[in-house]
Amino acid sequence: MKKNLEKIDVFIFDLENGKRRPYIPLFFQTFGQPIGSAPVVVVNHALTGNSNVTGESGWWNDLIGDDKTIDTNYFTVIAFNIPGNGYDDIFGNLISNYTDFTIRDVSRIFWEGLSFLKIDEVFAVIGGSLGGAIAWEMAALKPNSIQNLIPIATDWKATDWVIANVLIQDQILNNSDDPIADARLHAMLLYRTPQSINQRFQRSKFKDSSVFQIENWLANHGVKLKNRFRLSAYKLMNHLLKTNDISRDRKDFLSVAKNIQATIHVVAIDTDYFFIPDENRETHQQLLSIKENVFYHEIKSIHGHDAFLIEFEQLSQILKPIFNKQKQQNYVSA
């Protein structure tokens, strides 16, 4: 079991497709202030991420921690693991029937976890990519329970482009002799841009070798992921991306969004080739017709989708006003 990993037992959970799961273990980590003593920030991880958002090997250390943008001196930070992501090291917790699950199921499970922890309202739900899509759905499920919704490099629905790439990934994962590594090769080219790749490698080869640096870089990413990620987890996380749609079996997007009381901060990346910024700009314009407390922010980067994990200074500048205001209120009230 990973350090500081806690577990909530979720019993008799009915999935969106009508199937019933008798038991789902929900693993999570908390950082910063004790639960019940400070405003809560829920951080949702991306496809290959996990609950370890800060501290040793924390994947968002640049943003979360003592005296960081999301300051653990002032906030309680909670991060759940998407069930089946394998971070708990329990083989029995892996999910084989991955197509049974949707982002809505995961979001409901997260809310059950928060309810178990006696948390009815959170200061913010934030996440990038898949984590941001889960954030959108969490807001749709409980529109009065989130003060700030911060979806980054994501969307409230899966576009045809996303669905198409999920299919390619699924085909690789189910048909390749080296599925995790091969799927990662394709994914990395979605997460970056031609400009980023070309600028970095400039057609260079290893000395006395016919191997291009870009080939080695991609191969290494495949090997690294294979060494730390399970095949069943990759299949599930990839599948979840295409199930994203807060309007499914509800009214249209604006009717759903109109109920969301949270201040919405849509954060896009100008070169994102996966969740393209045009979709986010359109979402912002639509939201402005029904809400005043909605804002659009755009990270400028050559690096594409992965910029939310690279351009920390820009992202920090976007987030600081949101979290500093609450810190000041905490300080006054203390």
Image: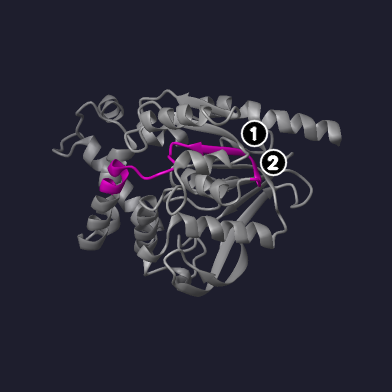
Q: Are marks 1 and 2 in contact (CB under 8 Å)?
A: yes
Quadrant position of the N terminus in the picture: bottom right
What amino acid does circle 2 point to?
A: Thr
- Residue 279: x, y in percent? 38, 32
The region drawn magenta spans 144-165
Which residue occupies the foreground of this view, 253 or 305? 253
Q: Which mark is residue 207?
A: none
Q: Residue at x 25, y 27 (%)?
A: 198
For residue 224, above or below residue 277: below
Which residue is label 2 attached to? 72
Left or right: where 298 falls relative to 10 = left
Label 1 crowd bin: few (<14), some (14–19), many (20+), radius 10 Å: some
- Residue 310: x, y in percent? 45, 33
Q: Residue at x 35, y 28 (%)?
A: 271
Q: Which mark is residue 68?
A: 1
For residue 135, above or below residue 203: below
Quadrant position of the C terminus in the picture: top right
Q: Residue at x 35, y 63 (%)?
A: 99
What amino acid does circle 1 point to?
A: Lys
- One can see residue 128 in this view: yes
